[in-house]
Image: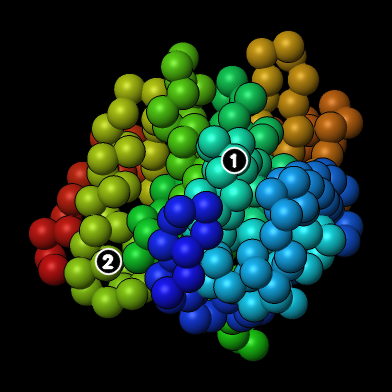
Amino acid sequence: MTQVNGTEVQGRVKADADEPGWEVDPDDEWGVAVVETVGRQLKLRREAVGMRAGQFAEAVGYGEDMVYKIESGKRIPRPEFLDRADEVLGAGGLLSAMKEDVKKVSYPKKVRALAHLEAKAAEIGVYECNIIPGLMQTPEHARALIEAAQPPYSPADVERMVAARLARRSVFERDPAPSMNFVLEEAPLHRKVGGTMAWRHQLERLLELGRLSFVTLQVMPTNADPHPGLDGRIELLKFADGTAVGRGDGAFNGRPVEDPKQLRILELWYGTIRAQALPPRESLAFIEKLLGET
């Protein structure tokens, strides 16, 4: 047991503190800036109370090498590390207050960028052909999909990716809410990702979201005629100022597009898909029937 500033600190915060998955992405300029700022503040606080890095490491329950990595901006600190550091250094909550920005840094850059756009959009339209849309996934469903990747992600990466995907769901809690339209292929609704109970929870989640006043959910039957979405996912985001951004896996190399001519093509595709899918009421009835068959 170690006593620092009158506070007794027991054991190690995390036995797996040095596991992979918490490195800073060098291409993430904002993320690098945040982690470097946090590390600099941490070092200044530590030096201000006259603690050597080794003493501080022992007090918070992390290795000295990890402390150096965090202070130099080469490692993303875990939330519990910041809480313990705040307590040990008597920072009065200033270090703990950095957890929210640090949490965002731990999400992959491209996911964070997508969540930022979704948070501003007035209209969101999504077509998925192979999976349940990420915005509509339950935690169990998201985890099972991410863990199925080959080569597999590290446990820490899985946790970060699941957390990032779930964080995007806050778009459903916006006030005012955006208009949201989803078209799902029938096939993924039959795939029991994560097992029977996880599949039931996912179907229940779809019904819950599909009944929201600002959400339209449609199912594309497997026996439907060919349509423009067979090449992959389509997403359209429209904003209050009249601008828009879209992406189609089978168009424009899958890159986000803002050019009006390219957007019109994606809108034509998406409109055709919605016209061929089951109407919303029939779609919910279809999902209810699947749920009742489990």
Q: Are marks 1 and 2 in contact (CB under 8 Å)?
A: no
Q: Nearer the viewer, residue 192 or 252?
A: 192
Q: Nearer the viewer, residue 221 or 266?
A: 266
Point out which mark residue 169 bears.
Answer: none
Left or right position of 40 against 147? right
| Residue 152 image offset from top left, x and y in percent | 59, 85
Q: What residue sits 40% from the left and 42% below the top?
A: 218
Marks 1/2: CA distance?
45 Å
How many marks are shown on the rendered structure? 2
Between marks 1 and 2 in the image, the one whose residue lies nearer the viewer: 1
Q: Secondary structure at mark 1?
A: loop
Note whether residue 83 is visible.
no
Looking at the image, which residue sits at the far bottom?
A: 151
Q: What residue sits 32% from the left and 37% below the top?
A: 210
On-image quarter of the N terminus? bottom left
Q: Which residue is the site of mark 2?
A: 199
Q: Which residue is the site of mark 1?
A: 91
- Which sits earlier in the primary sequence, circle 1 or circle 2? 1
The answer to which quarter of the image holds residue 294 is bottom left
Left or right position of 94 against 2? right
Identified by mark 1, the residue type is Ala
Identified by mark 2, the residue type is Trp
How many residues crowd mark 2 within 10 Å: few (<14), some (14–19), many (20+)? Answer: many
Q: Secondary structure at mark 2?
A: helix
